[in-house]
Image (cartoon, rainbow, N blue to C red):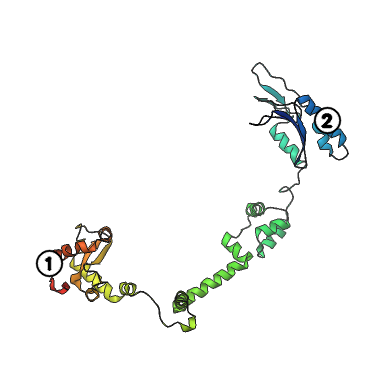
């Protein structure tokens, strides 16, 4: 149920007693007057509250006690309203208690709003402030505009604005500090000093006590020249074709038949290597020992000597 009286509401929450509530909102805060069994009791209590506090409440709160005007329905059960400003007639399925159309209501509301965005802008002075390195946000605060609003004013009048990165460098010192740090790191990387500092941090020692890098021996081998030579020799011998799936693929690996962790002396023996594609190489993970004899027999059938990889 609803009431035609402003400030009177019917509440029927689950598990609670159904009741009529009287309340008033002043300066964005609700003041509950009370709960009542009938609508008439709530209206009387509402009027008494307004009368008792008429010296405290603002004028706009006193007008709330007026009844809303009942609009009549037509034969199609629709409401008709004529805007008192422009005379436009509108039709509603539900009762609308405004006496203006939406457009006229917005115009009316702007009479009581601060003219933000409608004030005149001293474009020349604002753009001088902006060119001096001040951000759009700070310029907007000075001239009572938002950052986006004053930026649009500049663009509309042909004034160029900085992009985000340039604006950040000019308005925030940390961007300048980051740029200096990046240049310093780049310079140190070229001389190897940055790598030494990172190595000392990982080893947990001061930079003054640093003596050498601690790259694992296995990783050092893969970066070495001897591995690159061995890999190219294996791929050339096998014609750049995977020896497991017999396909020529874009990414090829040179696989150690006998693992170099156990047979380090065979790491550069061409007869201990075989060409595999990426998928076939990864499919051997954890099963390398099962394919050792298969690959050795395959190389033997191609005429490769097997005595070099015997242990």
| Element on which disc 2 rests | helix
> Looking at the image, is mark 1 or mark 2 nearer the viewer?
2
Where residue 309 is drawn, which disc sits there? Answer: none
Is 219 placed left or right of 280 in the picture?
right
Q: Nearer the viewer, residue 157 or 199?
A: 199
Would you name the residue on which mark 1 appears? 300
Q: Nearer the viewer, residue 154 or 73?
A: 73
Q: Position of residue 105 (x, y in %)?
A: 72, 35
Q: Nearer the viewer, residue 116 or 289?
A: 289
Most extreme residue toward the top is 75
Viewport quadrant of the C terminus: bottom left
Relative to residue 171, is residue 147 depicted above or below? above
| Element on which disc 1 rests | helix
- Splitting the image into 4 quarters, where does residue 92 fall? top right
Please tell me which of labels 1 and 2 falls first in the chain: 2
Q: Position of residue 20 (x, y in %)?
A: 73, 29
Is residue 7 visible from the viewing direction of this image? no
Relative to residue 49, is residue 76 depicted above or below? above
Viewport quadrant of the N terminus: top right
- Splitting the image into 4 quarters, where does residue 75 fall? top right
Q: Residue at x 75, y 37 (%)?
A: 108
Q: Position of residue 151 (x, y in %)?
A: 64, 54
Q: Residue at x 45, y 74 (%)?
A: 202
Is residue 188 visible from the viewing direction of this image? yes
Is 151 placed left or right of 302 in the picture?
right
Q: Position of residue 18 (x, y in %)?
A: 69, 28
Q: Residue at x 55, y 72 (%)?
A: 180
- Alpha carbon of mark 1 to alpha carbon of mark 2: how far? 108 Å
Would you name the residue on which mark 2 appears? 47
- Splitting the image into 4 quarters, where does residue 190 fall? bottom left
Q: Residues within 10 Å of mark 1 (few under 14, many from 20)?
A: few
Q: Are marks 1 and 2 in contact (CB under 8 Å)?
A: no
């Amino acid at each position: 149920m609803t009431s035609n009286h402003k400030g009177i509401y019917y509440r029927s929450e689950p598990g609670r007693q159904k009741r009529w509530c009287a309340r008033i909102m002043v300066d964005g805060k609700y003041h509950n007057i009370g709960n009542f069994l009938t609508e008439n009791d709530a209206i009387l209590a509402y009027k008494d509250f307004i009368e008792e506090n008429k010296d405290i409440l603002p004028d706009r709160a006193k007008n709330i006690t007026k009844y809303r005007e009942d609009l009549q329905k037509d034969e199609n059960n629709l409401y008709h309203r004529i805007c008192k400003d422009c005379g436009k007639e509108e039709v509603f399925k539900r009762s609308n208690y405004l006496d203006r159309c939406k457009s006229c209501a917005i115009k009316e509301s702007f009479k009581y709003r601060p003219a933000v965005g409608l004030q005149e802008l001293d474009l020349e002075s604002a753009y001088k402030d902006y060119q001096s390195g001040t951000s759009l946000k700070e310029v907007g605060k000075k001239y009572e505009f938002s950052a986006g609003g004053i930026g649009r004013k500049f663009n509309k009048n042909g004034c160029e604005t900085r992009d985000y990165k340039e604006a950040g460098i000019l308005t925030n010192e940390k961007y300048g500090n980051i740029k200096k740090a990046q240049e310093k790191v780049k310079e140190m990387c070229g001389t190897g000093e940055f790598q030494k500092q990172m190595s000392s941090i990982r080893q947990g020692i001061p930079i003054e006590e640093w003596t050498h890098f601690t790259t694992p021996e296995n990783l050092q081998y893969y970066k070495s020249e001897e591995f690159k030579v061995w890999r190219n020799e294996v791929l050339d011998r096998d014609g750049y074709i995977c020896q497991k799936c017999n396909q020529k693929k874009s990414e090829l690996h040179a696989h150690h038949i006998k693992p170099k962790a156990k047979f380090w002396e065979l790491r550069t023996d061409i007869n201990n290597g075989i060409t595999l594609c990426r998928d076939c190489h990864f499919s051997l993970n954890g099963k390398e020992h099962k394919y050792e004899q298969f690959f050795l027999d395959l190389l033997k059938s191609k005429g490769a000597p097997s005595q070099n990889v015997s242990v």
